[in-house]
């Protein structure tokens, strides 16, 4: 469990200091701040997602994040790294943008890390150094926003490395087509199972709270049902859904959470797949093989779609 303490911002200086102790090793916590795929899992207040999270982690490198609120509103943020000391310190600027793309305010963020006995102390110092009159309502929520963000960080890094799965693939297909392959049952029927299996049924209610369910027929002729519930849908950037096998009575077992992020890369689509949490390392490794084969079939399906277009 993470423990946190905070000091109230001093209004004259608009400065905030927060400290959290996390039950995770320093290397894992630092990676959560510098790997864009990991950072996208936890950045922002509770309920926010990050369909765009781009980090050029070097002095002078740019930061670009689009935070999506539960009501669908998108809040763009930009910044620049000033200093990076691996495992010890990050210094960067951050700025929220108005609808015209102009900074509402700018903050100098200094994050320090200290590890001991498998735990990590993170201290965030956020100092506002430039603000417009319109920035007040945003800055008034800065303390609460950072507290929720660090709570989400604590939850993200608490997942052991051997209980989560990461896969990255690049497909020679437009992002919109890849997204449709994940959300249209008639397309998923062609690929949503490991090689050698057949998808005999697939239904999807593609909305937050909507259910999905499919049946895989294994080479021995036995049928195996899988399904879950969509949590987040941001076309064509992001899909978050639960995933579980069904037992003989149709009850889900070994439920995990799957996040699929899609990013455009020079006319192609980079897919980052994340799944957590597994009941054992062997279960994770089994899923790794199954998903790896399934994504190969996705690539073949997309290639056929491209040739028929």
Image (cartoon, helix red, strand yellow):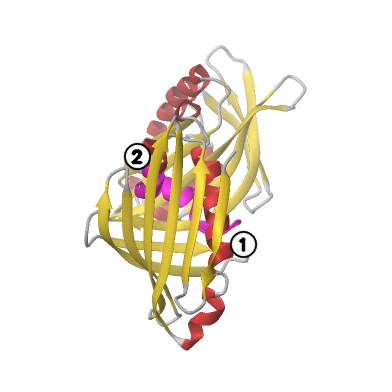
Q: Nearer the viewer, mark 2 or mark 1?
A: 1
Mark yes or no: residue 275 visible.
yes
Q: Write down the quadrant of residue 48 in the picture.
A: bottom right
Residue 177: assigned label: none
Q: CA distance from mark 2 to mark 1?
A: 28 Å
What is the x, y in percent for residue 162?
46, 25
Residue farthest along the top direction in this orientation: 220
Residue farthest along the right direction in this orientation: 249
Q: Write down the quadrant of residue 252 in the picture.
A: top right
Seen from the viewer's position, the closer of residues 194 and 74 is 74
Seen from the viewer's position, the closer of residues 76 and 107 is 107
Disc 1 residue crowd, few under 14, some 14–19, many 20+, Cα 10 Å: few
The answer to whether marks 2 and 1 mark residues whose Cβ atoms lie closer than 8 Å is no
What is the x, y in percent for residue 242?
61, 39
Residue 100 magenta? no
Residue 169: assigned label: 2
Seen from the viewer's position, the closer of residues 248 and 5 is 5
Q: Is residue 60 left or right of residue 142?
A: left
Determine which residue is flagged by label 1: 70
- Classify the position of the N terminus by image quarter: top right
68 up-or-down from 2: above or below: below
Q: Secondary structure at mark 1?
A: loop
| Magenta-drawn segment | 30-49
Q: Write down the quadrant of residue 218 in the picture.
A: top right
Q: Is residue 172 left or right of residue 182?
A: left
Disc on the earlier residue, 2 or 1? 1
Q: Residue at x 32, y 51 (%)?
A: 89
Residue 43 magenta? yes
Residue farthest along the bottom direction in this orientation: 133
Mark yes or no: residue 184 visible.
no
């Amino acid at each position: 469990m993470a423990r946190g303490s905070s000091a109230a911002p001093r209004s004259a200086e608009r400065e905030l200091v927060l400290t959290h102790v996390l039950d995770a090793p320093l290397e894992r916590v630092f990676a959560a701040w510098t790997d864009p795929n990991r950072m996208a899992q936890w950045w922002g207040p509770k309920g926010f997602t990050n369909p765009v999270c781009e980090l050029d982690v070097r002095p002078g490198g740019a930061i670009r994040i689009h935070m999506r609120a539960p009501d669908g509103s998108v809040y763009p943020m930009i910044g620049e790294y000033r200093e990076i000391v691996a495992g010890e310190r990050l210094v960067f600027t951050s700025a929220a943008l108005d609808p015209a793309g102009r900074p509402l305010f700018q903050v100098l963020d200094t994050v320090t890390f200290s590890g001991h006995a498998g735990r990590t102390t993170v201290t965030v110092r956020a100092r506002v150094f430039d603000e417009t009159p319109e920035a007040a309502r945003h800055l008034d929520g800065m303390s609460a926003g950072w507290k929720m963000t660090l709570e989400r960080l604590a939850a993200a890094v608490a997942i052991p490395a051997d209980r989560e799965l990461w896969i990255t693939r690049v497909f020679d297909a437009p992002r919109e087509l890849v997204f449709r392959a994940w959300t249209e049952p008639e397309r998923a029927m062609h690929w949503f199972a490991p090689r050698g299996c057949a998808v005999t049924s697939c239904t999807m209610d593609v909305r937050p709270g909507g259910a999905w369910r499919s049946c895989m027929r294994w080479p021995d002729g036995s049928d195996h049902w899988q399904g879950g519930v969509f949590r987040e849908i941001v076309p064509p950037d992001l899909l978050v859904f639960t995933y579980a096998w069904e037992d003989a009575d149709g009850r889900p077992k070994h439920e995990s959470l799957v996040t699929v992020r899609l990013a455009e890369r020079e006319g192609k689509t980079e897919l980052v797949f994340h799944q957590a949490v597994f009941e054992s390392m062997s279960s994770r490794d089994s899923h790794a093989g199954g998903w790896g084969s399934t994504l190969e079939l996705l690539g073949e399906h997309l290639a056929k779609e491209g040739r028929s277009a």
